[in-house]
Image (cartoon, rainbow, N blue to C red):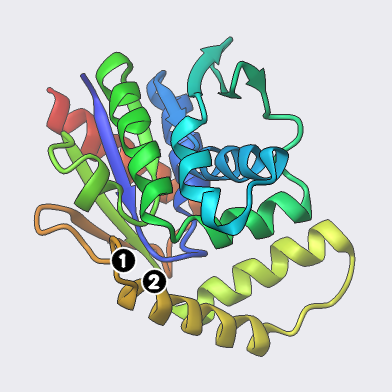
Amino acid sequence: MMTIAMDGPAGAGKSTAAKLAAKALGIHYVDTGAMYRAIAYGILTAAPADDAVEACVRDLDVRVDYIEDEQHVYVNGEDVMGVIRTPEVSAAASRYAALPVVREKLLGVQRTIAEQFDVVMDGRDIGTVVLPHAETKIFITADPAERARRRALELEQRTGEKQDVDAIEKEIRERDYRDSHREIAPLKQADDAVLLDTTHMSIEEVVAEVCRLARANHA
């Protein structure tokens, strides 16, 4: 199987590059963020007591399928892709993602997908934890100032409002520190991953390099 694991800090552009690389290579893009949102949606829907959250997560039936090359995540039989992008679910996903039981739940799902399909999977622990034996591992990064600039541009295009780039950079640096020092699956480059610094690269150049590495390793 062609398996590409892409790790890296927030705002480095790994998700965008992964989606475009998957399309160029004709394989599936695995949206791990959607899976965490789906778990959060399942918890919010069940509304368990605080001491029953772990049991709730273990009882959730989480399944992923691809329909016309689009990823669909099902929770207890419900296709939740249309309901997991709300601010409430996003906040819950960030909160619950730190729970070991959530990561344990999704680990099996993510590995099963990689066994069934040729995939590009991105996240902050894909090459180190989820797919340690991936055929191609790439750690995508960029200077925090450049990541902040890109994020500000994205928000300005979406909202039409001018963004505070310095504040965004401060938030990115704080998040980098938290992700690198968390107890469970901290952000780090796998020993056998290729480091790809995209600070001075266009998205087209990044995608081309990802595809080149994947094809070379799969030859």
Q: Is residue 48 left or right of residue 54?
A: right
Q: Quadrant of the N terminus?
A: top left
* Relative to 14, 1 lies left or right: left
Q: Could you tell me which residue is drawn at 30 percent across and 14 percent down?
A: 116
Total numbered labels: 2
Label 1 crowd (10 A; few <14 / some 14-19 / many >=20): many
Q: Are marks 2 and 1 in contact (CB under 8 Å)?
A: yes
Q: Which residue is denoted by mark 1 in the rendering?
A: 187
Q: Earlier in the sequence, mark 2 or mark 1?
A: 2
Where is residue 198? Give x, y as percent.
40, 63
Up/down of 18 relative to 167, above or below:
above
**Residue at the image position 89 percent from the left and 65 percent from the top:** 160
Q: Provide the secondary structure element on which disc 1 rests.
A: loop
* Residue depicted at 15% across the width and 25% down the height: 218
Residue 132 found in image quarter = top left
User: Residue 45, position in %: x, y?
Assistant: 71, 38
Give 21 or 33, whichever is nearer the viewer: 33
Foreground: 215 or 192?
192
Residue 104: mark in rendering: none
Location of the C terminus by quadrant is top left
Q: Is residue 186 above or below residue 145?
A: above
47 or 217: which is nearer to us? 47
Which of the two residues, 103 or 31, is positioned nearer the viewer here? 103
For the residue marked with disc 1, what is the amino acid? Answer: Leu
How many angstroms separate mark 2 from mark 1 (CA)?
Answer: 5 Å
The numbered disc on residue 179 is 2
Q: Residues within 10 Å of mark 2 (few under 14, many from 20)?
A: some
Mark 2 lies on a secondary structure that is helix
Q: Which residue is depicted at the point 21% across and 62% down?
A: 189
**What amino acid type is highlighted by mark number 2?**
Asp
